[in-house]
Image (tube, rainbow, N blue to C red):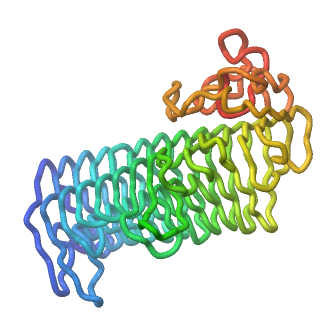
Amino acid sequence: MKGANAQLTLNNLTISGGYTSGEDVGPAILVDEDATLVLDHVLITNNTAHHTGDVRPLDGVIIAWSGVLKMNQSAIRANSAPSDSALTLSNVDAEIVNSDIADNDAAGIDIWRGRTSIKGGAIRNNAQTGVFALYAAMDMDGVRISENRKFGIEVRATTLTMSNSQVVDNIIEKQAFGPQAGGMAISFNSVVTLTQTSVIGNRNYEEPGVEILGYDGIFAIDSTLTLIRSLVADDLSADNDDYAMAVNDGVLTVDNSTVSGSNRKVLWLGGAADAVILDSTILSTDPDAFAALNNTTWGEVRVGRSIVQSCWDPFTSLGYNLSAERGCFKRSREGDVLDPNLSAYLGPLQNNGGPTPTHALLAGPAIDAIPPHDEGCRPGQSLDQRGFIRAGGEGKGGAACDMGAYEA
């Protein structure tokens, strides 16, 4: 299908059994030259794009080269395109709503330039990356990306806004080229914002007897990453030593969020990373952990109103922080507290209400530590990670704000 005036609308249909090899592409559907494709309650299944040589055309079960794609309550499932993806979009304006891209012997979606909006649905159990984007603009809302076997999401030179979503239980089965993270790999000056989103339970590639530097949750390099009321955690097992999140030579903002893990290294900041962490919790359940590693050479890491269990190299305090270890901050500011019993004050990572798991604040000096109207504590207006009110009075956070991501 090609041409700016070409439009194909498919309703309540199954497309199955397509096969391409040689120079042919798009065994299910090929969209070209600004055409428009609309899929409504359509199942694309058991199609094969068979291109195995080093020199091959752009592969994929559905391929759109420019144009418009609208996909509603449809599925691309159990197809084979081992050299590429189930859905390939190049310079396409795409809107995918409540759809399922799953169980393909391929990547889920490859996006090359263009704008893509994904609302609801899932991208799951694909043999390669769940979503790959290059020079693209994307937004996702209410999407679950899970059990893919290269990365959950990889973005390069891309703007991604993700809200109310989950990136969970993805695994890198083979060592990948470049920055690798089971959950999200972010590079080449990408700008990524996560709001009310969980990145948890993802696992990096491991090989017995071989030490491979990897990251379970997120690795961002030369990019800008913002977490708002979100969670990043490792795979919650103690049998590997990968980081939950790392930022190298970029900008990190953590706001009312949690970075948590079961290993000795949870958050790593390196190179020229510049970071600000506010109203957040950085915690490892390993008693010998360095929950936060500050290896920045030229950047500055500023932390305020937060709980940081332990550190390797100090941060710049903005005040009202709780740490279990002396030396987390270059110099103490007003409200900073050192308490080696910190781990006893926090509950396990679990559902405590709200869209993402949190560590409940059970007791200790972090409760009601920040005076109203001081250092960002706005009574009845400030919200914690769960979206619950801080300092709203009895039963609503008390008379003052708590340190960390959780308002007791």
Q: Residue at x 60, y 60 (%)?
A: 191
Farthest residue, direction left: 17
Whole-percent x, y for residue 91 in the image: 41, 71
Farthest residue, direction top: 394
Q: In what quadrant of the picture does the C terminus appear? A: top right
Q: How many marks?
A: 0
- In this view, 210 is above or below 368: below
**Looking at the image, which is closer to me, 223 or 289?**
289
Whole-percent x, y for residue 242 in the image: 54, 57
Q: Residue at x 25, y 45 (%)?
A: 73
Relative placement, left or right, of 256 versus 332 is: left
Whole-percent x, y for residue 193 in the image: 58, 51
**Looking at the image, which is closer to me, 14 or 203?**
203
- In this view, 353 is above or below 327: above
Whole-percent x, y for residue 221 in the image: 62, 67
Q: In which image quadrant can residue 407 be found?
A: top right
Q: Residue at x 81, y 25 (%)?
A: 369
